Structure formats: C-alpha cells, structure tokens
Image (tube, rainbow, N blue to C red):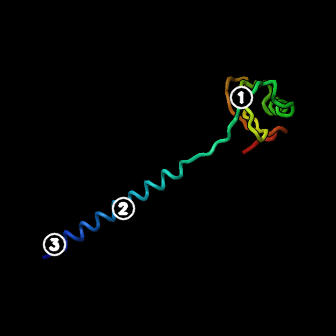
Amino acid sequence: MKKLIFTAVFALGSFVTFAQEAATEAQDTATEVIAQDSFTDISVEEVPQAVSDMIEASYPGSTINKAQKNEENHYKLEVALEDGTVGSLTLNEEGKTIE
C-alpha cells in the first residue's frame, strides 16, 4: 500500500513538472514577434536636403551608400564614414533621428 501511494505521488509530481516547462516555452516564443515598416529603395539624390545636411554636419566626410523611404516619409540610410565604418540611421524628412 505504501508503494502504491508513493508511486501515485511521484507520478503526479512528474506531470506537474512537465506542465510547467511547456508553459514556459510557449511564453518565450510569443515574445519574439517583431513588426517592421516597409521601406522601398530610392536613389540617394531623392533624399531631402535637410537629411543630407544633417548627415554632413554630424558625420563630416561621410557618404550615403543606400537610401530607403517608407509611407510616413521616414528615411533609412546606410552611411559610410571616412574610416570605413558603415552604419544605419533612420531619420524623418526634417533630418531628426527616429528611435
């Protein structure tokens, strides 16, 4: 009789442990969803003068390698610095940084 009760308690404890692990895994995957805005490629010449001026003032000697624009007039730029470092910036049409 003691063995039967011990086995029942052990089995019940195992079920609870597995149930908790499954719930944790479901929560982890739900937090990995990321929304992205759709940007379309544009030529560097289409970038507004205010944006170009901000890049030149903040990063003297840099060049804009690639430019993209979305429906909200936000610009995603790939900028190369003089030392060869390449970075990405997202700005509005007035040249202000967007977080």
**Quadrant where the image shows the N terminus:** bottom left
Label 2 sits on a secondary structure element that is helix
Label 3 sits on a secondary structure element that is helix
User: Taking 40 as reference, is 31 above or below it?
Assistant: below
Label 1 sits on a secondary structure element that is strand
Amino acid under disc 3: Leu
* Label 1 to label 2: alpha-carbon separation: 48 Å
Which mark, residue 4?
3
* Label 3 to label 1: alpha-carbon separation: 70 Å
Q: Which residue is mark 1?
A: 41
Is 21 on the left or on the right of 97, as rendered?
Answer: left
Is 93 on the left or on the right of 68, as rendered?
Answer: right
**Quarter-wise, where is residue 21 in the image?**
bottom left
Amino acid under disc 1: Asp
- Determine contact: label 3, label 2, CB under 8 Å: no
Q: Nearer the viewer, mark 3 or mark 1?
A: 1
User: Taking 87 as reference, is 4 above or below it?
Assistant: below
Q: Position of residue 18 (x, y in %)?
A: 33, 59
Q: Residues within 10 Å of mark 1 (few under 14, many from 20)?
A: few
Q: Residue at x 27, y 68 (%)?
A: 12
Q: Which residue is mark 2?
A: 19
**Quadrant where the image shows the C terminus:** top right
Tell me which numbered mark, 3 or 2, is placed earlier along the sequence: 3
Q: Position of residue 5 (x, y in %)?
A: 19, 74
* Label 3 to label 2: alpha-carbon separation: 23 Å
Q: Residue at x 29, y 67 (%)?
A: 13
Tell me which numbered mark, 1 or 2, is placed earlier along the sequence: 2
Q: Position of residue 22 (x, y in %)?
A: 39, 57
Q: Residues within 10 Å of mark 3 (few under 14, many from 20)?
A: few
